[in-house]
Image: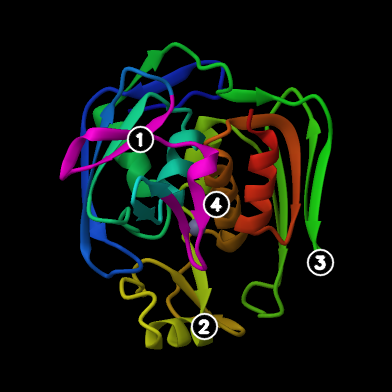
Amino acid sequence: MFTWPTNYDSCYTIAGVITKEGVGLHSGEKTKVRIFPYEKEGYYVSFADKPNEIFRLTQDLIGSTMLCTAVKLGRRNLYTIEHLLSSLAGCGLSYIHIEVDGKEIPLLDGSAIEWVRAFEEVGIKKVPKPENFIRKINESIIFNKEDSLIALTPSEKTTIISTISFSYKAIGNQTFVIDLNPKCFVEMIAPARTFGFKDQFQELSELGLIKGGSLDNALVCDGDKWVNPPLRFHDEPIRHKILDLIGDLSLVGLPKAQILVYKGSHSLNARLASSLKN
Ligand SMILES: [Zn+2]
């Protein structure tokens, strides 16, 4: 059986080629992704119709939209990249080339687990460790927006302590603490699906914004109950928030730090990531 490392002391890439197809959240269209090992460190993307134009993903290319993380690659945007990036960084993988046929990364089941299972199928192999694979932190950093905050203090490990608080009773207050490593990521974070709210879901569908959104790729909360139970964990929403945070930090390197998040968001995560980049 495949076993994931219990630390980030070594860096890996995949040992074979992965192909996955699925529906894009925004367009509702089928999109296809192939993932290859690459000779250089980092994450690279090309579009299937322009194989010679290969972009290295950097924090500067990240633009967020209302509903997902997008990257600007030349004249095109690539949407909904966050869960794939989270699964790569969480599993300790680098030296990766992603080829996309379409304009979105498929949402799959709304979590990172299908990517992880695909990595396990082809296996992983050790590669030289990039300098900022796990980023050393020298001083504390804090950002806040209204009552939400993200704070980071230097540590020998990568520890995430995250809390959300929703008035919807089905979610309420949830806190999750994790000393991150590939094995813990795969077991505790990767299976957690994205979540949304019934009223918001209807509004966005009417605006034609989430043509690919369905009860198969998001948990939908309706006040004090879930529209599509069962949950994979009783605290699946907070675990998904951590999945998103890992994706948002993936292009600058996970920090050796205690990261404390209260009511986290992509925009706060992005501010932290921008402050960490070289
Ligand atoms: Zn997400």
Q: In 3D space, how far apart are the residues under numbered discs 4 and 3 (Cα atoms)?
A: 20 Å
- Bin the neighbour count of mark 3 within 10 Å (Cα to Cα): few under 14, some 14-19, many 20 and up: few
Establish if 193 lies above or below 225: above
Residue placed most toward the observer, 176 or 252: 252
Is 140 in the magenta?
Answer: no
- Bin the neighbour count of mark 1 within 10 Å (Cα to Cα): few under 14, some 14-19, many 20 and up: some
Q: Secondary structure at mark 4?
A: helix
Q: Is residue 160 left or right of residue 200?
A: right
Q: Secondary structure at mark 1?
A: strand
Looking at the image, tell me whether mark 4 or mark 1 is earlier in sequence order. Answer: 1
Residue 267 pos. (x, y %)? 64, 57
Q: Is residue 268 left or right of residue 200?
A: right
User: CB of residue at label 1: within 8 Å of ligand 1?
Assistant: no
Residue 165 pos. (x, y %)? 73, 68
Q: Secondary structure at mark 2?
A: helix
Amino acid under disc 2: Gln
Q: Which residue is mark 1?
A: 55
Chief SS of the magenta region: strand
Looking at the image, tell me whether mark 2 or mark 4 is earlier in sequence order. Answer: 2
- Residue in the picture at 43% in, 49% down: 71
Amino acid under disc 3: Glu
Q: Which residue is mark 2?
A: 200
Q: Which residue is mark 3?
A: 146
Residue 86 pos. (x, y %)? 48, 43
- Residue in the picture at 44% in, 42% down: 85
Please, which colouring scheme is shown? Answer: rainbow
- Residue in the picture at 60% in, 48% down: 245
- Bin the neighbour count of mark 2 within 10 Å (Cα to Cα): few under 14, some 14-19, many 20 and up: few
Amino acid under disc 4: Asp
Looking at the image, tell me whether mark 2 or mark 3 is earlier in sequence order. Answer: 3
Q: Which residues are the magenta region?
A: 42-71
